[in-house]
Image (cartoon, grey):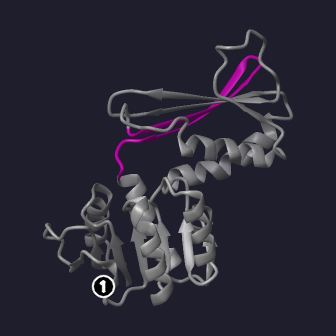
Amino acid sequence: MTKIIMHGCNGHMGQVITAICAADEACEIVAGIDIVDNRENGYPVFTDIDACDVEADVIIDFAAAVAVDKLLDYAVNRQIPVVLCTTGLSPKQLTKVQEASKRIAILKSANMSLGINTLLKLLKDAANVFAPAGYDIEIVEKHHNQKLDAPSGTALALADSINEARNNEYEYIYDRSQVRRKREKKELGISAVRGGTIVGEHEVIFAGVDEVIEFRHTAYSKSVFAKGAVEAAKFLAKQEVGMYDMSDVIG
């Protein structure tokens, strides 16, 4: 049984993870951390992480960037691994994450979905087949109209997976409206669509002569990210000190 502290337990993702763990006999949330204790979670909630004295195997973090520094200090002091899902960390915070990973196990990934991380692996093989054959590569990502960044971090991770397999020979192109020219062979186009309540869609296109191959991932709810975080927590609780990502979880 993996004992989990849920950092950001009262947020949407925290509540989804709470429900997933309640139905999973292999793990249990033993405590939560949030700025207020205003829910019936079925476990104690601490408004100050330093006050949390509950024994745990791992922490899942889905909070806010402003809370990450204190979380890392707590985790290092208590020697508890962290699945770090909060995004938007500053360069200084990212450095602190790297330093903390020298003392505890930390798992950080651009996307916690098991499906996306399996796709990252498949794209490496696909790129090594289609790129040498001259296929053009494009990525189209779609998200809800409240998303602030474009392209998504996941779209960039997909592009990076392809580019790493090809020795970084591709240039990322985000906008073709300013230049009138034919498509270059070594450009990888990344397009962003924003609208409605789309949770997340990512499509990778390999377009050749008279043939198109498409890889597509669609998230219908944020529970796919929560499920991945729980699986990551089970994995990380058994690991040695170091930095990990979801590719380590799926093997």
Horizontally, residue 187 falls left or right of residue 35, namely right
The magenta-colored residue range is: 199-222
Task: Determine crowd level at label 1: few under 14, some 14-19, many 20+ residues with C-alpha closer than 10 A.
Answer: some
When the figure is inspected, residue 123 is found, relative to residue 98, above or below; the finding is: above
Q: Residue at x 36, y 78 (%)?
A: 4
Q: Residue at x 25, y 67 (%)?
A: 35
In terms of image quadrants, where is residue 1?
bottom left
Point out residue 36 in the picture as x, y percentages from the top left corner: 20, 68
Horizontally, residue 145 falls left or right of residue 89, namely left
Point out residue 134 in the picture as x, y percentages from the top left corner: 83, 27
Q: Which residue is mark 1?
A: 52
Q: Residue at x 50, y 80 (%)?
A: 81
Horizontally, residue 9 falls left or right of residue 181, namely left
| Most distant residue in the front direction | 92
When the figure is inspected, residue 206 is found, relative to residue 71, above or below; the finding is: above
In terms of image quadrants, where is residue 188?
top right
Q: Nearer the viewer, residue 124 or 186?
A: 186
Horizontally, residue 229 falls left or right of residue 100, namely left
Q: Nearer the viewer, residue 174 or 72?
A: 72
Q: Is residue 200 magenta?
A: yes
Point out residue 230 in the picture as x, y percentages from the top left corner: 41, 68
Specify the amino acid type for callout 1.
Cys
